[in-house]
Image: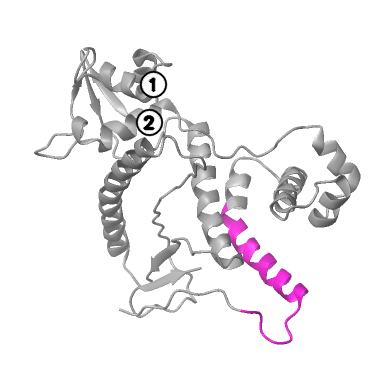
Amino acid sequence: MDTSPSAEPTAEPAGATGPRRADLALRTALALATPIVRWLLRQGVQYGAFVAALKRVFVEVAGEELRRQGRRTTDSALSVLSGVHRKDVRALAHLGRALQRDKSFSPASLVFTRWATDPRWRDPASARPLRLPRLGERGSFEALAREVSTDVHPRTLLDELERLSLVRVDGEWVELVADSYVPSADEAAMAELFAANGADHLAAAVHNLTTTEPRLLEQSVFASGLSRASAEALGALARQLWAQDFARMAEEAHRRFQADRQTSQPHRMRFGVYYYMEPEASDTEAAVGPKESSS
């Protein structure tokens, strides 16, 4: 197995300049933007609309950077750092926040996660989520839903999970039919997951590239020269490994959340995994086995 060591942040080579680093960052960003642009074009979003919307992102992130440095977020400072004209900065300031981050988990996703990972709601023999009676004070979907939320009626949560094709209702019984919370029946919910997962993945890489603080986990295994059958078999293995890690991480996260309710400085976290396959370009040389990569 051919492995490559995890890359560590290094000082810029002698003679390197700020523009050189900026050019490297820009070229890297363009590579990262390729799948985003592919998605935008397939959804009918053209270049002009994207560039106009991007101004707001530059201004908001510039404000975050200024506050992180302890500097005032004046129109001039925002304009200088972001490169957006002052008149546009002022106009955007009146439109409110553009980015929605740290969005609370939906009650439906919390019910799904509790059902899929909590030992009380899993069959001890098969480790699969239990088939639940719809109603009842204990051991039912109604009881599970009320554990998670007292603000949303269990019937409403059941309807939402059914709409997202995550459960099957059979008379007075309810069965979890999805292995992960992927609401394929709701394009808007899928887009929200895409934004949250993708943004945090890139944020981990940017953290590792731009700070000297403790490094975050951001690695992958890459292999080429595979048959389609092998690539699909590895994809199935990836799903199996994720199911195990998802259950363990969700249980531990819930335990720590309960223990940390009184913390004065709350933090958030996200742990994820992805798998991607595609045909190789004709001029790509096959790798000699898998490689581990990291930012």
Rendering coords of residue 6 (x, y %): 45, 74
- Is 29 left or right of 22, judged from the image as shown? left
Query: Which residue is identified by label 1?
Result: 149
Q: Is disc 1 surrounded by few (<14), some (14 to 19) or many (20+) residues within 10 Å?
A: some
Residue at the spot x=19%, y=31% of the render?
120
Is 288 magenta? The answer is no
| Position of 216 relative to 93 (above/below) | below
What kind of residue is marked 2? Leu
Element type where label 1 sits in the image: loop
* Labelled pair 2, 1 in contact (Cβ < 8 Å): yes
Q: Of the residues under marks 2 and 1, which one precedes in the sequence?
A: 2
| Position of 222 relative to 256 (above/below) | below
In this view, the residue in front, 38 or 156, is: 156
Query: Which residue is identified by label 2?
Result: 110
In this view, the residue in front, 71 or 230, is: 71
Label 2 or label 1, whichever lies nearer to me, is 1
Query: Residue 234's image quarter?
Result: bottom left
- Is 287 left or right of 252, judged from the image as shown? right
Residue at the spot x=62%, y=45% of the render?
40
Residue 3 visible: yes
Secondary structure mostly taken by the magenta-highlighted segment of the chain? helix
Element type where label 2 sits in the image: helix
The residue positioned farthest toward the bottom in the image shown:
14
Rendering coords of residue 76 (x, y %): 88, 50
- Is 128 left or right of 68, judged from the image as shown? left
Q: Which residues are magenta?
A: 11-35
In this view, the residue in front, 230 or 222, is: 222
